[in-house]
Image (cartoon, rainbow, N blue to C red):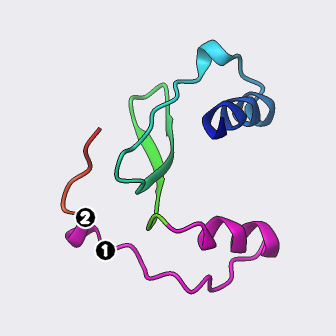
Amino acid sequence: MNKGLELIEACWLFDATPEQIQVVVHPQSVIHSMAAYHDGSVIAQLGNPDMRTPIAYGLAWPERIDAGVETLDLFQVARLDF
């Protein structure tokens, strides 16, 4: 259900069709969003799997506040699998 709502949200926010969006579930829940560009580069938003971060961002937007979540340690994550 959540991914369906996120697809609708992405279509609306980016004026895209569902065919232009690929839904990928990251099992480790570290990658929260990614965007691929025409030049082949990809940007991603990564963070610990903790809903306090997006909730704090939504409540404080456009500012960023301390959500009480530890900083993501990529050395501890070590690898990202799909």
- 6 versus 20 height, above or below: below
| Residue 65 sits inside the magenta stretch | yes
Type of amino acid at the residue the image marks with label 1 = Asp
Q: CA distance from mark 1 to mark 2?
A: 6 Å
Q: Residue furthest front?
A: 1
Disc 2 residue type? Val
Q: Residue 57 location, x and y as percent?
A: 71, 70
Residue drawn at 39 percent across, 43 percent down = 26
Q: Position of residue 1 (x, y in %)?
A: 66, 35
Write down the residue under mark 2. 77
Residue name at image x 44 percent, y 82 percent: 70
Residue 73: image tag: 1
Instruction: Please give the range of residues in magenta.
Output: 50-76
Residue 21: image tag: none
> In this rendering, does residue 68 appear at all?
yes
Element on which disc 2 rests: helix
Q: Is residue 22 above or below residue 52?
A: above
Q: Is residue 61 visible?
A: no
Q: Quadrant of the C terminus?
A: top left
